[in-house]
Image: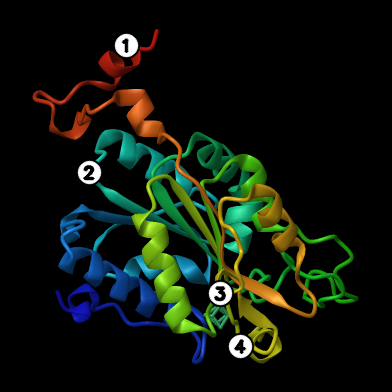
Amino acid sequence: MEVREFDSPAKNTWCLGCGNFNILAVVKQVMAELVESGDVKSEQIVISSGIGCHGKISDYIKVNSFYCLHGRVVPPLMGMKVGNQRLKVIGFAGDGDAYDEGVSHLIHTARRNLDATFIVHDNQVFALTTSQVTPTTPIGFKTKSVPKGSFESPLNPLHLMLACGATFVARGFTGDIPHLRSLILQAVRHRGFAFIDVLQHCPSFNPTLEKFKPKVYDLNKEGHNVEDFAAALEKAKEWNDRIPIGIFYQVKKEIYEKQLLGDRLLAEEKPLPSVQSVLQEFM
Ligand code: SF4
């Protein structure tokens, strides 16, 4: 399958040099590889995205997609997988969308271990609305909402996901495309909730490419044991002089929809079960 078969006719309006282009390119490559290798058919891939610059990715990839309300990227993933376990579902969110408006959905879906991939375009700022603080904005960073600099301690997304029980926790960087491609491919092939926080360069409001590039290193090339929870927590603290990217934690655990439904495929049941009849089974 050719990557270009995932190209959409929509005009791309991201700013020149935006890290979102790299995420988009990599995701289309991964999708082509998944189809080529027989992992999934293209019509079985469904994506959802939220509100923010990242959200336009739903317009730019020619697959079935769900454009969500702000912070509501995860609930459609849950609904789609419960309705049809054969789907490959991938959610895209910004750092504001994922860690602010949508954080409760993220927490509970991670602990349930839904078989889904969740990719955060983390540029540490609300960029679509031209620069306000998000939960990952660093201390001292000046935006329109805090002209004297942010004074709030930023959230550590990796610590959050580790604490919630996500079974695949990783960090990517839009300045290292081959690494990001490998990471997203492994995340999508992981059976369970796969989370990637991607450090995303935003040339218009938070240009981080040159700042992060000399500091970023691949922790999986330095002997990190991905099954060691304590080591993952420790590595996730590292930030200032060296910034680890790669898989921090990965373990096997039964997935949510299998525990809920066994091998039932609600989407293929004839006639399709009503919502009431499904709910009745749990009452
Ligand atoms: Fe990308 Fe930033 Fe422009 Fe949004 S504002 S499209 S995140 S460069």
Q: Nearer the viewer, mark 2 or mark 1?
A: 2
Splitting the image into 4 quarters, where does residue 187 fall?
bottom left
Dot placed on the residue nearer the N-terminal end, 2 or 3? 2
Q: Position of residue 170 (x, y in %)?
A: 55, 61
Q: Which residue is mark 3?
A: 221
Residue that appears at 42% across and 66% down: 184
How far apart are labels 4 and 1 at the CA level? 52 Å
Dot placed on the residue nearer the N-terminal end, 1 or 3? 3
Residue that appears at 16% across and 58% down: 41
Looking at the rendering, in which quadrant would you find the C terminus? Answer: top left
Q: Marks 1 and 2: in contact by CB < 8 Å? A: no
Dot placed on the residue nearer the N-terminal end, 4 or 1? 4
How far apart are labels 2 and 1 at the CA level? 22 Å
Label 2 crowding class (10 Å Cα cut-off): few <14, some 14-19, many 20+? some
Between residues 33 and 269, which one lies in front from this camera angle? 33
Quarter of the displayed picture in which ligand 1 can be seen: bottom right
Q: Which residue is mark 4?
A: 203
Q: Which residue is mark 1?
A: 281
Dot placed on the residue nearer the N-terminal end, 4 or 3? 4
Splitting the image into 4 quarters, where does residue 173 fall?
bottom right
Q: Position of residue 69 (x, y in %)?
A: 48, 51
Q: Is mark 4 within 8 Å of ligand 1?
A: yes
How far apart are labels 1 and 3 at the CA level? 48 Å
Q: Marks 3 and 2: in contact by CB < 8 Å? A: no
Q: Which mark is residue 162?
A: none
Q: Secondary structure at mark 1?
A: loop
Q: Which residue is mark 2?
A: 86
Label 3 crowding class (10 Å Cα cut-off): few <14, some 14-19, many 20+? few
